[in-house]
Image (spheres, helix red, strand yellow):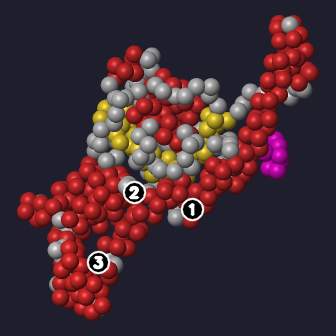
């Protein structure tokens, strides 16, 4: 019987085991590391193992559709045709659904759901302030992503929701969006606009009120009145929006939710991964794993260039064997770099079993390719 100090550390569970009881998986990471493809492959892999999975992208580049072999994605969850998997020899025991977030339409749907009175609803949707605000939000995606995540979790029967997010710094905006939105909905600034217009003008001060008055006289647009009217028309919606926002904030910290950090061995994405892990930990959000894409695995191994040339000489001939050995030596530079990065990230992020996806010679463009990636992730 070995002494306690001689015992090997326990092997961490596989990613599939870590995701066994998870219902919401949020993939975060720097841009250009294959995060969208990873999200789609992860969803496909879980669906292939018998679960009903929805994958959602809020990435404006709209790459998820092509990764799934589709011409386009709807702004509502759409099931991938089972025949599409059979045609590419991909076994599918469950269901895979996919959607692309339409930020403005999502906000319009929130108003429609939360304001039962038709006249009040039309007043909100027709208000010029709302049209400008919803258009601006459509360029950022975070607030509508909150609403859609809540809807999919609360109103649909998916076993798992996989959410792809924008590149790293924007992903942090997504993490902080519930807190910022709640601060606005429950803050004093909103109460100013909910007050009667005369009181609102007094709270703004005489100077600001004069500016608004001159603006209205020149343009014919009473901005202060439009703002006050808009926010007062939202009274019936604000409580519901706040409830959803609190629900998402709680959901992201729920034991059934987890974040997956996706990166690559390059220096900048690796640094982003460390930054993201620190932020997630500080926010009390659970990390389920570290996925490192595009890792070079094939090099010289434990041999020198001359030894590899000699080993291949009998099969390839001396000249060709020498060229192959030199080519492997070039790749070995990347192999050594990637090994060092993996070891460093494993230590800094306390990930004893990072998921390594090898560097592929071709782009993943279809379901068969996604299934290959899924096996690296979950196999």
Point 20% across, 59% down: residue: 111
Sequence-wise, the earlier of marks 3 and 1 is: 3
Q: In the rendered image, which residue does mark 3 sit on?
A: 190
Q: In the rendered image, which residue does mark 1 sit on?
A: 279
Region rendered in magenta: 1-10
Left or right: where 264 falls relative to 242: right
Point 37% across, 55% down: residue: 139
Point 8% across, 59% down: residue: 118
Label the magenta part by its dominant secondary structure: loop
Q: Secondary structure at mark 2?
A: loop
Q: CA distance from mark 1 to mark 2?
A: 20 Å
| Of the pair 11 and 153, the residue shown nearer to us | 153
Q: Is residue 162 visible?
A: no
| Of the pair 238 and 67, the residue shown nearer to us | 67
Dots 2, 3 in contact, CB < 8 A: no
Residue 352: percent from left, percent from top? 68, 46
Left or right: where 98 falls relative to 378: left
Q: CA distance from mark 2 to mark 3?
A: 21 Å
Sequence-wise, the earlier of marks 1 and 2 is: 2
């Amino acid at each position: 019987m070995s002494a306690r100090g001689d015992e090997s550390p326990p092997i961490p569970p596989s990613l599939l085991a870590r995701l066994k009881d998870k219902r919401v998986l949020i993939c975060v990471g720097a841009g250009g590391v294959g995060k969208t493809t990873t999200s789609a492959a992860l969803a496909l892999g879980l669906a292939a193992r018998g679960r009903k999975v929805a994958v959602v992208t809020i990435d404006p580049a709209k790459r998820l559709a092509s990764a799934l072999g589709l011409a386009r994605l709807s702004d509502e969850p759409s099931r991938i045709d089972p025949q599409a998997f059979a045609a590419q020899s991909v076994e599918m025991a469950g269901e895979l659904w996919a959607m692309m977030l339409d930020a403005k339409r999502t906000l319009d749907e929130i108003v429609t759901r939360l304001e039962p009175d038709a006249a009040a609803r039309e007043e909100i949707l027709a208000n010029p302030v709302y049209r400008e605000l919803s258009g601006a939000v459509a360029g950022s995606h975070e607030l509508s992503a909150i609403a859609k995540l809540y809807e999919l979790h609360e109103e649909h029967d998916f076993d798992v929701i996989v959410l792809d997010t924008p590149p790293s710094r924007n992903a942090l905006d997504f993490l902080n969006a519930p807190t910022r939105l709640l601060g606005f909905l429950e803050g004093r600034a909103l109460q100013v606009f909910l007050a009667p217009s005369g009181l609102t003008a007094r709270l703004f001060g005489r100077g600001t009120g004069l500016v608004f008055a001159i603006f209205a006289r020149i343009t014919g647009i009473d901005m202060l009145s439009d703002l006050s009217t808009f926010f007062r028309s939202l009274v019936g919606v604000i409580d519901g929006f706040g409830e959803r926002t609190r629900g998402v904030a709680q959901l992201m910290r729920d034991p059934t939710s987890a974040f997956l950090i996706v990166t690559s061995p390059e220096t900048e994405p690796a640094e982003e991964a460390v930054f993201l892990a620190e932020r997630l930990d500080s926010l009390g959000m659970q990390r389920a794993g570290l996925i490192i894409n595009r890792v070079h695995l094939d090099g010289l191994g434990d041999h020198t260039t001359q030894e590899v040339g000699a080993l291949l000489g009998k099969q390839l001939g001396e000249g060709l064997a020498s060229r192959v050995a030199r080519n492997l030596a070039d790749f070995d530079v990347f192999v050594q770099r990637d090994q060092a990065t993996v070891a460093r990230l494993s230590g800094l992020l306390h990930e004893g079993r990072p998921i390594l996806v090898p560097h592929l010679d071709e782009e993943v463009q279809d379901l068969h390719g996604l299934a290959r990636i899924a096996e690296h992730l979950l196999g």
